[in-house]
Amino acid sequence: MGFFGFGKKGKIEYIVAGLGNPGSRYENTRHNAGFKALDLLAKEEGFEFKRLKFKSLIADEVINSKRCLIMKPQTMMNLSGDAIYEAAEYYNIPDENVIILFDDVTLDIGKTRIRRKGSAGGHNGIKSIISALGSENFPRVKIGVGKKPNAEWDMADWVLSEFPKADKDELESALKNSVEAVKLIVGGEIDNAMNLYNS
């Protein structure tokens, strides 16, 4: 049975992409919150990321009755747009069906925020996606990773620092909420997702 199209009904309608940096040294860093959310989704839905395509680890899964390409770009964060664009172009996915999960340093750990569209807000992964798609009109699920403790911290150092063990429960709560939000967005219920999970 072929991987693309033969085993599942219908065409791919959504891209669900979590952002992060590939490699074990980045695994538990703040910048990898998007990867962490997709790992939780995979665990809940019973699938694994086994294929490499579109410069990403991918899975082809049905979420909330919609066939989705689930992606963890392996390009490094600031080139995420290359991977997303390639997949969106291949499957002819409209921007509003490209859902991106990523870390947000303006939100406390444990918080999530869903947006229908918007600017990059200084996030290099989102900047890359906006540039590649030529559009800001894609939904995003922001996962709070905490603000810098003081102005002296370099932002790159901060996002590449690891989550403290003390924040494990709050982080898991936010990841769980972000996964639930994705299921609603895929089901056409982005307003409901915002009402429930914007904190």
Image (tube, grey):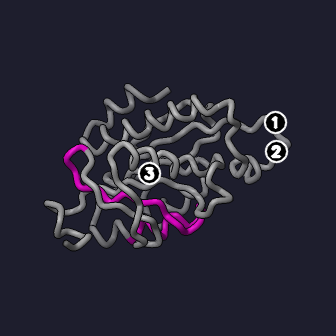
On the picture, is 10 further left or further right than 193? Answer: left
Residue 54 x, y percent position in the rendering: 41, 72
Above-or-below relation of 192 to 139:
above
For disc 1, the marked residue is 150
Where disc 1 sits, the SS reads loop
> Going 78% across and 35% down the picture, which residue do you hit?
149
The answer for how far apart the CA atoms under marks 1 and 2 are is 6 Å
Indicate yes or no whether the magenta region holds residue 52: no
Disc 2 marks a residue whose amino acid type is Trp
Task: Check if mark 1's residue and mark 2's residue have beta carbons within 8 Å.
Answer: yes
Q: Along the line of sight, which residue is nearer the eye, 144 or 134?
A: 144
Q: Earlier in the sequence, mark 3 or mark 1?
A: 3
For disc 3, the marked residue is 100
Residue 26 x, y percent position in the rendering: 65, 56
Q: Along the line of sight, which residue is nearer the eye, 24 or 196?
A: 24
Q: Quadrant of residue 194?
A: top left
Q: Which residues are magenta?
A: 64-86
